[in-house]
């Protein structure tokens, strides 16, 4: 109950900000790729499995879905360099879809945010040997998931 109140307070604080920034950082308690998938999100149970659609040559590739609200793909590579090469591949694929808006950052960890013509919003980012792609209904849904899953902290 107290955890839900804290999350609601955090979401209200986020909504009150004119522009919120997300600092992506893996939680210190992160031990397994399965840990990035929360049990339930916005009333939708998780459905996870191996990402056989797009392995990108990763040692481990997982995908998780929360109904039609959000999809999270996670890849673990042998090195940071491999992760960044796969990041470039995913970003090129997204750019071929001619997003109606996008933002890209390449300092420290790589990050790409886009809004597709359909309105689906996506974020692709690296954290050392890991590569993440999140597709959601909108930016707020993605931010809420990042905070809920403890993959990100609000700055």
Image (cartoon, rainbow, N blue to C red):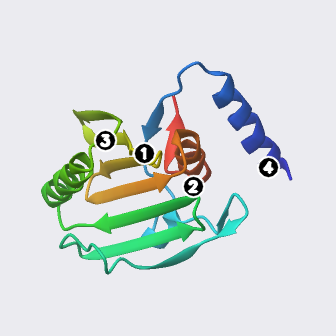
User: Helix, strand or loop at disc 2?
Assistant: loop
Q: Nearer the viewer, mark 1 or mark 4?
A: 4
The residue carrying pointer 4 sits among few (fewer than 14), some (14 to 19) or many (20 or more) residues within 10 Å by Cα, namely few
Residue beneath label 2, please?
Answer: 149
Which is more N-terminal, label 4 or label 1? 4
For residue 60, what is the image quadrant? Answer: bottom left
Q: Residue at x 36, y 57 (%)?
A: 132
The residue carrying pointer 3 sits among few (fewer than 14), some (14 to 19) or many (20 or more) residues within 10 Å by Cα, namely many
Residue beneath label 3, please?
Answer: 111
Q: Residue at x 53, y 48 (%)?
A: 146
For residue 50, what is the image quadrant? Answer: bottom left
User: Helix, strand or loop at disc 4?
Assistant: helix
The residue carrying pointer 2 sits among few (fewer than 14), some (14 to 19) or many (20 or more) residues within 10 Å by Cα, namely some
Q: Residue at x 53, y 69 (%)?
A: 65
Residue beneath label 4, please?
Answer: 4
Compared with 99, 97 (above or below) is below
Which is more N-terminal, label 2 or label 1? 1
Compared with 37, 24 (above or below) is above
Describe residue 67's horizontal placement relative to residue 30 as left or right: right
Q: Nearer the viewer, mark 4 or mark 3?
A: 3
On the image, the x and y values in percent for residue 7 come to 73, 44
Q: Which mark is residue 25?
A: 1
Q: Nearer the viewer, residue 5 or 123?
A: 123
Q: Which mark is residue 69?
A: none
């Amino acid at each position: 109950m107290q955890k839900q109140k804290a999350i609601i307070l955090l979401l209200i604080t986020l909504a009150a900000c004119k522009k919120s920034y997300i600092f992506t950082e893996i939680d210190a308690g992160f031990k397994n790729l399965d840990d990035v998938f929360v049990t339930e999100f916005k009333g939708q149970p998780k459905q996870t499995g191996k990402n056989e659609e797009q392995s990108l040559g990763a040692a481990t590739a997982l995908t998780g879905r929360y109904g039609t609200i959000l999809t999270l793909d996670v890849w673990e590579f042998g090195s940071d360099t491999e992760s960044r090469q796969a990041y470039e591949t995913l970003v090129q694929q997204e750019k071929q879809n001619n997003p109606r808006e996008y933002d890209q950052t390449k300092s420290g960890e790589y990050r790409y945010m886009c809004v597709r013509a359909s309105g689906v919003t996506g974020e692709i980012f690296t954290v050392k040997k890991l590569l993440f792609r999140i597709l959601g209904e909108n930016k707020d849904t993605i931010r809420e998931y990042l905070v809920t899953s403890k993959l990100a902290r609000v700055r």
